[in-house]
Image (spheres, coloured by chain):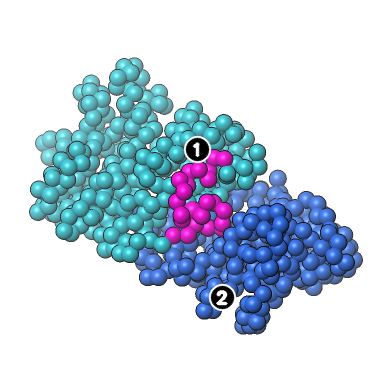
Chain colours: A blue, B cyan
């Protein structure tokens, strides 16, 4: 199968007939954004053996590649419009791999309403390198940024924190002997993150004015990511360790191994949203949480202090030391 | 140097302060296109050792990566706005490489007025994989497509054809013994293509109505690329081999080796524009050629016939057989 046949067979159907894709027949995609909407552009690259393992399967890789980009759109409050796909495939990625990869993309294209608009397909003698560029829109003037937090703002996080990190520990053999009922949902969180698009949209566009003063998605870990918010906003953040929302599997593990709690605040790949908001917006945020059926937990506050500082306090108010903040690659 | 330092040192300055880049501090770029403009999105990936050689030097690689994308914008008649950059760098691409690469990007960012808006930087144990996604705009309803040619339309090509292919032959040792005065400009054409942005803009937006009925940039070779136009437009194309515009070096080589002429029509990487236009627009196209100081040569016509067929005729009107149409990779 040559490049043109591969495009026609596996990729062209993924446009779902979207006008902007021009049937993948032209040099570029062509699109007129709706009036009053700003364009949001984000892109992420994943390398085989580094950001994912071959054993994960092509469908899961496709899902993760799309979802990490969708999560970046969510963090800005954007609604997905479409994506570009660049694949540099190696000798290991045969036609069966491509078929499974396209199937994985197709499922999430329908799930999130984000069709393929264009891209490029090349070969590499090395590990596969996959790039998705996601395009979305947000009401002009309503985009969520990292730099808007003010001293006194509440800090929130959606869903639960640390599951993907525990899933990674399971996957890498650093957390053994767990029953399937605990390990399976943790691995699921690692491989199939759920981008918080409805939350981002609600925070940006759901009320009379933007609800969140700053927002970020959790890719590198709660501490590092909130560190970006603190740095860009020119202030410090205080977090309460006991307030951290844990899933049932994570809560069971921490009950057995309390020393794991701090790690969860440093672990990456959760793709929840962390955001700040003035305390006057608490009721609206509680309403949004109920409307979305998604926990939005207040875990701390922004304070005047050194820009970028994030301090974690235990139940007694003493600072907790966190080792090894940041994202762990497979290699 | 960690990832954040590399971004701050080498990449953030490449935004040239553009608002949409948000200083590379956020999850995405944010941009409101001007009213009445459609957005054009195109992306190309290059693999070290395949689409370029390490010996080319990082600055030349940067220039080529940007320019092949700019050429796709030109083919749609778009004006560049900015670009996203994804780098998967291997063990060979050290900090000196990155510094030279950034310098090459910077020179073309200023040359073409297309700043960096965002991107992603990862590591790979394999060959470097580089992706640029270029974003441009075109007046709504004026974009050039591949599918608009009609039987009877003239076929034009800009500049000269086949120089990059001869440059590649020089580079790969298939064309030896040339004096420097011939080989140097051919290699320059291969390494530093000149995207025909002003031409694309002139064809799309320069007159009362769109001047070109179809347009494509020459990346895979004149024959293959015009084959796309013929296929998308549902007709055939007849080209005149003697009409082919050649540079002085190419003309000298063909004078010595007439058997090379057909190869030039199949050779890739010229990044000229080939376009079609009704014969009633000849005067306007001649004016545009003069205004841009760029040869626009009529090399054939579109005719009713099998969709996608491209036939080359010699001076006697007999069909010429072309062997090996299409793009040649290094590996």
Q: Position of residue B278 (x, y in %)?
A: 14, 54
Chain identity of mark 2: A
Q: Position of residue B106 (x, y in %)?
A: 45, 39
| Circle 2 SS class | helix
Say whether residue B10 is magenta.
yes
Q: In the drawing, what numbered circle is on residue A202?
A: 2
The one of B118 and A7 positioned closer to us in this rendering: B118
Is residue B302 positioned above or below A100 on the image? above
The Cα atoms of the two marked residues, 1 and 2, are separated by: 39 Å
Q: What residue would you read off at disc 1? A: B102
* Label tally: 2
The residue at 60%/51% (across/down) is A46
Q: In the drawing, what numbered circle is on residue A297?
A: none
In the picture, measured across the screen, residue B91 lies left or right of residue A122, that is right
The one of B131 and A211 positioned closer to us in this rendering: A211
The residue at 77%/58% (across/down) is A311
The one of A278 and B59 positioned closer to us in this rendering: A278
Is residue B22 positioned above or below B126 on the image? below
Q: Position of residue A62 (x, y in %)?
A: 58, 60
Identify the image quadrant of residue A127.
Answer: top right
Crowd class of label 1 (few under 14; some 14 to 19; many from 20; radius 10 Å): many
Say whether residue B17 is magenta.
yes
Q: Which residues are magenta?
A: B9-31
The reply to whether callout 1 and callout 2 are in contact (CB within 8 Å) is no
Q: Are marks 1 and 2 on the same chain?
A: no
Q: Position of residue B321 (x, y in %)?
A: 24, 38
In the picture, measured across the screen, residue B258 lies left or right of residue B113, that is left
Residue farthest to the front? A304
The one of A48 and A268 positioned closer to us in this rendering: A268
């Amino acid at each position: 199968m040559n490049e043109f046949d591969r495009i026609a067979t596996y990729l062209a159907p993924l446009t779902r007939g979207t006008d902007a894709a021009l049937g993948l027949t032209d040099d570029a995609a062509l699109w007129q954004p709706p009036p009053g909407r700003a364009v949001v552009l984000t892109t992420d690259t994943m390398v085989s053996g580094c950001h994912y393992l071959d054993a994960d399967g092509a469908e899961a890789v496709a899902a993760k590649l799309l979802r990490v980009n969708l999560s970046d759109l969510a963090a800005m409050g954007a609604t997905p419009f479409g994506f570009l796909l660049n694949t540099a495939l190696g000798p290991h990625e045969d036609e069966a791999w491509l078929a499974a990869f396209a199937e994985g993309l197709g499922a999430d294209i329908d799930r999130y309403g984000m069709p393929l608009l264009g891209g490029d397909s090349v070969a590499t003698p090395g590990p596969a390198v996959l790039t998705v560029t996601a395009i979305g829109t947000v009401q002009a003037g309503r985009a969520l940024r990292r730099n808007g937090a003010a001293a006194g703002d509440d800090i929130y996080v959606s869903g639960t924190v640390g599951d993907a990190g525990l899933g990674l520990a399971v996957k890498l053999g650093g957390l053994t002997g767990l029953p399937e009922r605990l390990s399976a949902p943790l691995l699921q969180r690692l491989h199939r993150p759920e981008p918080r698009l409805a939350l981002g949209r609600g925070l940006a566009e759901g009320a009379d004015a933007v609800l969140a003063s700053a927002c970020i998605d959790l890719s590198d870990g709660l501490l590092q990511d909130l560190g970006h918010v603190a740095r860009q906003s020119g202030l410090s953040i205080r977090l309460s360790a006991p307030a951290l929302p844990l899933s049932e599997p994570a809560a069971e593990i921490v009950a057995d191994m309390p020393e794991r709690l701090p790690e969860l605040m440093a672990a990456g790949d959760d793709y929840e949203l962390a955001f700040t908001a003035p305390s006057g917006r608490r009721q609206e945020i509680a309403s949004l949480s109920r409307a979305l059926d998604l926990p939005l937990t207040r875990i701390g506050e922004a304070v005047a202090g050194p820009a970028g500082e994030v301090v974690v306090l235990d139940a007694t108010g003493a600072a907790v030391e966190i080792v090894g903040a940041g994202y762990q690659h497979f290699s």
